[in-house]
Amino acid sequence: MAEEKESVGREVFDQVILPVYAPAQFIPVKGKGSRIWDQQGAEYIDFAGGIAVTALGHCHPALVAALHQQGETLWHVSNVFTNEPTLRLAKKLIAATFAERVFFANSGAEANEAAFKLARYYASHRHSPYKSKIIAFHNAFHGRTLFTVSVGGQPKYSDGFGPKPADIVHVPFNNLDAVKAVIDDHTCAIVVEPIQGEGGVMPADPAFLQGLRDLCDQHQALLVFDEVQSGMGRSGKLFSYMNYGVTPDILTTAKALGGGFPISAMLTTESIASVMSPGVHGTTYGGNPLACAVAEAALDIINTPEVLAGINERRAHFEKALDAINQKYQVFSAVRGMGLLIGAELVEKYHGKARDVLMAAAENGLMILNAGPNVVRFAPSLVIEFEDIEQGMARFEKAIARLVNAA
Ligand SMILES: *Cc1c(COP(=O)(O)O)cnc(C)c1O
């Protein structure tokens, strides 16, 4: 038996953790499906999904079984050797998408870092060392490494860390003319989230994504889709590019890929991948057997007609409940997103209050997210029980009533 563990409360956070987060006052200790319990035994319904990560809810039996089985078999060997789970997962991702080659990493930022490096390397080797311009979008989010915050379009995340990687241009999202004005033959890539997540749950217009595809083809630039948040079923299809019918050259996925186990992947074609050679890029944990075994189990479940069809069915329940709440309280100006990535924008009167809604929800036993100061975001399990949606929305209404009564 393990010896009894020391008890730790929320106040310890402020004493031991780098102050880059402001977590809620309660500490979750156990989860099952779409329910969470805290240290005091209080129960929460989870509409946050660990920020679009726990796509099959907490402790899904198939994921637990995969983790358990692989945990008793082989944990880690490094990329000096390959391993079976990594090869199986890569084959399945390739079978399910446009891709022909896969690179595994551990987080969304690292998958994007690999994507941006590949785009630059490819252009430099196949075209010219001067073909290095990356076009990205205002309010985009691509992760927290220095390259990815620099490509992300939010100065609050990239300022203050010294010189940034150069030759990155930001233009307004969903504005094709703005892209046309800056793209040229020195452009190596356009990087875009088909649905901006952190930037306020903003889906790209279909004509915009198709326009980006055409511009990339005209200028021999690569189209990179960051599907770290929008991927793995979130949009109602395995990847959101499948809703648009626009195929990227490079795609990144993370968050829901491991259902809560850290793993990410960059997908690309054989032709683009062939520019790389041993030693050019890598990471110690990439393709770790434990992570890949869990992700394979998650992919096997998510990429089925039943689960994918259930996503928009669940969205309809969310929309209906949000509509009813809005009829009563007039708090939302728009409900947007795709599948189970849902953003409810607050009317001007409540601008800046998204975090207050989140706090009020927590006090009523509900975990939700915001996406910027004005948008309440829901990214629940893709297999959330309908009963949990109804009960969670009843709790959400209480949080909204609190907001309205406090105004
Ligand atoms: C969360 C997110 C990232 C960063 O992923 P990490 O795992 O936090 O590094 C990158 N891009 C998008 C679109 C995201 O939502």
Image (spheres, rainbow, N blue to C red):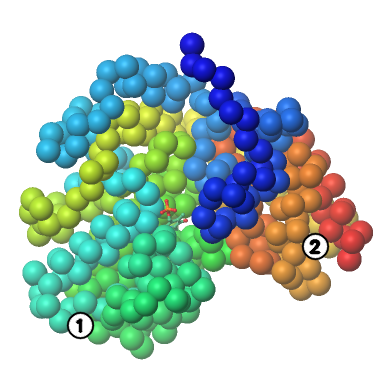
Q: What is the quadrant of the C terminus in the image?
A: bottom right
Three-letter code, disc 2: Val
Tell me residue 34's x, y (percent). 63, 32
Image height of 63 relative to 224, above or below: above
Q: Residue at x 81, y 57 (%)?
A: 326
Q: Is residue 80 left or right of residue 296?
A: left
Pointer 1 or 2: first along the chain: 1
In terms of image quarters, where does ligand 1 lie? bottom left
Residue 362 location, quadrant: top right
Image height of 138 relative to 326, above or below: below
Tell me residue 227's x, y (percent). 40, 54
Res. 331 mark: 2
Q: Residue at x 39, y 24 (%)?
A: 67
Residue that numbered label 1 is attached to = 185
Three-letter code, disc 1: Asp
Tell me residue 379's x, y (percent). 58, 47
Residue 10 location, quadrant: top right
Residue 232 location, quadrant: top left
Q: Is residue 26 left or right of residue 178?
A: right
Query: Distance from label 1 to label 2 (Cα)?
Result: 46 Å
Q: Are marks 1 and 2 in contact (CB under 8 Å)?
A: no
Question: Tag 2: Cα neighbours inside 10 Å, few (<14), some, or many (≥20)?
Answer: many
Q: Residue at x 51, y 33 (%)?
A: 56
Residue 275 shows in this picture: yes
Q: Observer-nearest residue: 123 or 64?
A: 64
Secondary structure found at label 2: loop
Question: Tag 1: Cα neighbours inside 10 Å, few (<14), some, or many (≥20)?
Answer: some
Residue 245 shows in this picture: no
Q: Is residue 309 left or right of residue 374?
A: left
Q: Residue at x 8, y 50 (%)?
A: 278
Secondary structure found at label 1: loop
